[in-house]
Amino acid sequence: MHELGVVKHVMKTIRDVAEENKVIRVGSVTLQIGEVSGIVNEQLVDCWNWFREKDDILKGAELKIEVMPAVTFCENCKKEYETVKHGKICPYCGSPNTFLVTGNQFEIKEIEAETEE
Amino acid sequence: MKTIELHRTITDSNDRDAQALRDKLSAKGIFLVNIMSSAGSGKTTLLLRLIKDLKEKAQLYVVEADIASDVDAVAVENAGARSIQAHTDGMCHMDAGMTADALESLLAEGSQSGNGLSIVFLENVGNLICPAEYDTGAHRNLMILSVPEGDDKPLKYPLMFEKSDVLVITKTDALQYFDFSMDKAFERVKRLNPDIKIFPVSAKTGEGMDALEEWLLDSAAKLKEA
Ligand SMILES: Nc1nc2c(ncn2[C@@H]2O[C@H](COP(=O)(O)OP(=O)(O)O)[C@@H](O)[C@H]2O)c(=O)[nH]1
Ligand SMILES: [Mg+2]
Ligand SMILES: [Zn+2]
């Protein structure tokens, strides 16, 4: 399952950041996930809720997900359109000569945390 | 509570681990090749052939990514390579941390081969999606596409083709039975990745294996010299 790997990597990054910033406890973690990143958000949250309890500073930390819209560009008519609605075929001119501009990103945006000082 | 802004992609920490592992391996002159493919593409057959042909020329190791791996540890050892079991905990890909764990004792041992070459084949988990997203610390990524899978695979799994340094097209002896156009495959792959090296081979008849083996030995030798 892909989401398990994702959760483990997010946690690892946050542990590193927590150490650098003398974090005692993490309150929440905000991710920005593209609409077409292939991640199943519910599974990600389930997985997160399971693993956070095994970690002292992440215990109880809420996982917030911001879904980022996917946009495709048509090479033929030079217009942009919503990827999820129309897929690979341009709704304006019918061309399949299109590419994804944004929408498959996966970023850790920020965390809310309690620090030592 | 205070807000700490990160704006990091999730593979950030893995990328750093991968570079650290790559540096360690380079320092020891051990060449690591990450092998990716879908299940049934002919990984076992290709690996066993490579081991048979190269065992006199280099010290060979195979890291197997799964207990359920189709590459049989016994077959690998019998062919003349050392088999190392990795632990993926049911994950759909190998990452740098898991690879480093698997190679820990090999790295601690120091050079086994003296002045000779060392090549480690990492047999990644058998799918074309997840392994493409994680740097394992390998010096080169090699993907296998078999003729029966079709020449349209690059259209379906573009990231895998973009991330690979080498594409091995296997089962070329079966070309006459399948609707697979070598020209189309080359064109589609090169459009995604102009620098990729492509080796059409048959692990069954041995056709094309020479070029691939030469590339492997050359790459391992260059690493050793550097
Ligand atoms: N004709 C032909 N068959 C092959 C070749 N390489 C592998 N095979 C066959 O493809 C099947 C799957 O091969 P295997 O190596 O087990 O694939 P893996 O699951 O990727 O490890 C087996 O029946 C092999 O005999 C090849 O070069 N030519
Ligand atoms: Mg096999
Ligand atoms: Zn258009």
Image (tube, coloured by chain):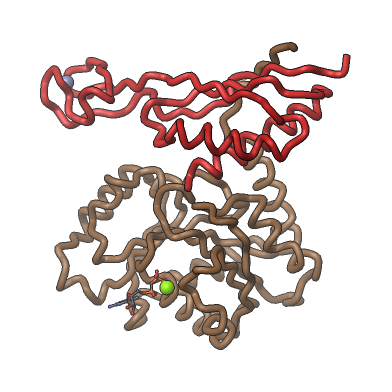
x, y (%) of residue A67?
Answer: 44, 21
The answer to whether one can see residue B218 in this image is: no
The answer to whether one can see residue B198 in this image is: yes
Q: What is the residue that sits farthest to the top in this orientation?
A: B2
Please report the residue visible at 57 percent of the width from the left and 47 percent of the height from the top.
B135
B183 to the left or right of B95? left
Please report the residue visible at 38 percent of the width from the left and 26 percent of the height from the top.
A35
A51 to the left or right of B76? right
Residue sitting nearer the eye, A15 or B103: A15
Quadrant hosting ligand 2: bottom left
In the rendered view, tell whether residue B164 sits above or below residue A77.
below
Q: What is the residue that sits farthest to the bottom in this orientation?
A: B78
Please report the residue visible at 52 percent of the width from the left and 84 percent of the height from the top.
B75
Q: Quadrant of residue B176?
A: bottom left
Specify the colour of chain A: red
x, y (%) of residue B136?
Answer: 59, 52
Residue sitting nearer the eye, B52 or B219: B52
Quadrant containing the C terminus of chain A is top right
In the rendered view, tell whether residue B3 sits above or below residue B101.
above
Chain coloured brown: which letter? B
Q: What is the residue that sits farthest to the left in this orientation?
A: A94
x, y (%) of residue A85?
Answer: 23, 22
Please report the residue visible at 58 percent of the width from the left and 38 percent of the height from the top.
A7
